Amino acid sequence: MQTVSLKLSPTEFHFRAKRLLDHIKRQQLSGAVLFDNFHVTYYTGFAFIPTERPICFAMNADGERALFVPRLEVEHAKAEAQAERVESYVEYPGNPHPMKQFAEILRRLEIREKIGADNDGYPWILGYQGEALSSLTGAQIIAVNPFVEHQMMLKSDAEIALIRESCKWGNLAHRLLQKYTRVGANETEVSIRAGNEATLAMIDALGSLYRSQSMWSRGASAGYRGQIGRNAAIPHALTTNAIFMPGDVLVSGANAPMWGYNSELERTMIIGAASAEQKKFFEHTVALQDTALAAIKPGAKCGDVDCAVRAYFDQHDLMSYWRHHSGHAIGLRYHEGPFLDVGDDTTIEPGMVFTVEPGLYAPHPSTSSGQAVGGFRHSDTVVVTQDGIEALTYYPRDLASLTIPV
Amino acid sequence: MQTVSLKLSPTEFHFRAKRLLDHIKRQQLSGAVLFDNFHVTYYTGFAFIPTERPICFAMNADGERALFVPRLEVEHAKAEAQAERVESYVEYPGNPHPMKQFAEILRRLEIREKIGADNDGYPWILGYQGEALSSLTGAQIIAVNPFVEHQMMLKSDAEIALIRESCKWGNLAHRLLQKYTRVGANETEVSIRAGNEATLAMIDALGSLYRSQSMWSRGASAGYRGQIGRNAAIPHALTTNAIFMPGDVLVSGANAPMWGYNSELERTMIIGAASAEQKKFFEHTVALQDTALAAIKPGAKCGDVDCAVRAYFDQHDLMSYWRHHSGHAIGLRYHEGPFLDVGDDTTIEPGMVFTVEPGLYAPHPSTSSGQAVGGFRHSDTVVVTQDGIEALTYYPRDLASLTIPV
């Protein structure tokens, strides 16, 4: 009997590797070398916390896959990674430096000239310092990022199933967040309680089917990221432990990483009856999101979606409240390309998964009320189909449903 | 009346900037450009979540500091950043690309030739793609990482005070973790409950004095990261929602980011009476840690500490259980340089803060018992003083204190 699991199958990883191999051959590369942790996870299924200890993936023109890890990750990598070999170095910085050994492994794999790579060496994070790949190998380095990123943009049915499952538990966390958000409560307390209960329900419901496989979170979460009242106008503010007050405009966020895959659900909620001005901004927010949703279709450009949204901003004289583009792709990363941005001319294709989230931010007192209004943003996760989109998020978007009673 | 706060003062940031300026002058650079998010936070106090939208810091040879952010971060950056100017671009990818505008700002700041930088352009994370700094400016790029990393290694009294405060709340989270860890409980449930309660106690105790200013966590946390029983032998395994069983050897971790600063507390705990073999490994773990602690002193090399630890491994025939070096520095980052590693010849100086954490990992059945033993590691955070070290961690390290009753 086969064990039921939501985990991606080895077949999925063979298919991914095959596509990369096709690219290597088409470009007449000696192989591909990847340093970005999400790129490594994408091709091997090995999820890990990136540190100053390099973890690198290499594939040669025969399709042989090697994962290079520090000694302390060997058992973990052998248990999890889809790769023909797991090679290890003792430690970083070590003596000799791990990259000397990696260069030797590349030589043995006959990855020698014209190497496709996503970076010219391991990135200098958390104090890591080391030689560039070009200098280590003497090879010409060809950027493979455009290919890798494009492959990652097109989600398989199995990936979409994980994102769909993520949406469910993000929905639960957000439902609880809304339920516990009350005047006088602290945002941290409410966020913790909602995330806690949603996570426990999820792991009891999914049992061994579930792993977060995320370095960011071990379960479902929902919170405000500091976007409370006046602070709501700062789109990415970090948390400030605010106490909820009547009249606050809240911008929330919820997610539940599912075997590494993310979804995004964000809602604007208002504590108590919305003022006329808040109501006006709320309605524009929904209309802006509708504008974006209507513009996403196979064959259109990502930039077209953002142009349609900006046209709405212009028509309604809202540009002074504009702060960011209309959305981004999502998957193993909470943000990834392509972007629903005027400057992104990527063609939209079936299998792309986007967050759709135009926002309005009114941090300064308007002339009519003398009060700051706040930030307004809904974010829904959608997948592009053969002829349009399917919404994966199903949380209500209307003001009545998103008003917190006082 | 001055408001009490644990937040670092503007003076602290002026002092940091002054040191960087001295370096710029000494090296006859036209200025410094930093892309790493922790480097930017270190010099400006502006904490943010790095995304595909570049955020960059520049300082010219007159000491003028500029922070370059997307439109959506302008209010946030102006409110938080210690910098003479906050410059913004519309959006990424945008049109034109933000880096074109950044190059223009560098020209206006007269950062033109011989630029000190921590990377040749914004790193290609989360789908970001863009031109290298050298290509944008035509300037020679000189690595400033060694200088910046060295400056960050030497913590000020204010930074040490934050790490000390972090230790307290990490201690509480760990105390609760230990209290709730019982046979039959799920690691996720226990971790959530401990982190939840410790965080609520902390924010009630510290009130407005507290901000996590971390993208990883909004409060105190404690957990097992999957290091339960057999999995305990995989040092950095991600969580697996294990159920605690008698005989499990657990390796825990606790932290509470305090205005961005981290501490590390890790303990080996055993559920029920330790077997003779577990006891032997536990005692070696404590002895190894004592060996490392005794070797950390100003003037010694980081490598000396690891050599002393490795000598203990050799003397007691333990190298087959060795997986990683003896520790690392900690601060704004949960790992940073220098490393207590044979390959790190950095001289230990007062003000450095290290985790001290040699570990033993026995994943395979030993001949004597036929059973896998598990992983063993304590991690304590210590600060180097004028003549030795001061422990910032004060959680008990002995087996009796770390045995979970069954």
Image (spheres, coloured by chain):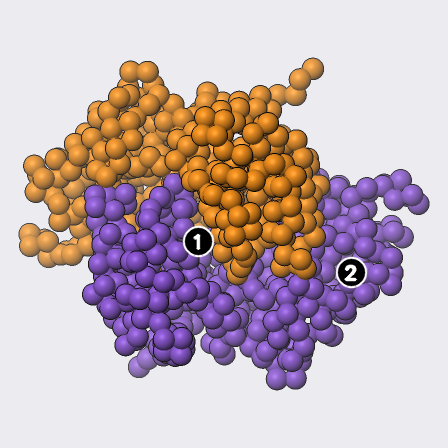
Chain colours: A purple, B orange
Q: Nearer the viewer, residue A135 or A232?
A: A135
Residue B313 in view of the camera? yes
The residue at which mark 2 appears reads as: A285
Residue lying furthest right = A368
Quarter of the image where one finds residue A127 = top left
The chain identifier of the residue carrying mark 1 reads: A
Left or right of B193: which side holds B5? right
Estimate the spatial distance between the alpha carbons at disc 1 and disc 2, rounded to whole Å.
32 Å
Residue B16 in view of the camera? no
Quarter of the image where one finds residue B209 = top right
What quarter of the picture does the N terminus of chain B occupy?
top right
Q: Amino acid at mark 2?
A: Thr
Callout 1: SS = loop
The residue at which mark 1 appears reads as: A215
Name the residue: 78% across, 60% down.
Answer: A285
Few, some or many residues within 10 Å of mark 1 (<14, 14–19, 20+): some
* In the image, residue A218 above or below residue B401: below
Name the residue: 24% across, 24% down.
Answer: B300
Q: Do the CB atoms of the residues marked 1 and 2 lie less than 8 Å apart?
A: no
Q: Amino acid at mark 1?
A: Met
Q: Nearer the viewer, residue A250 or B402?
A: A250
Quarter of the image where one finds residue A306 = bottom right
Left or right of A220: which side holds A271? right
Q: Nearer the viewer, residue A291 or A286?
A: A291
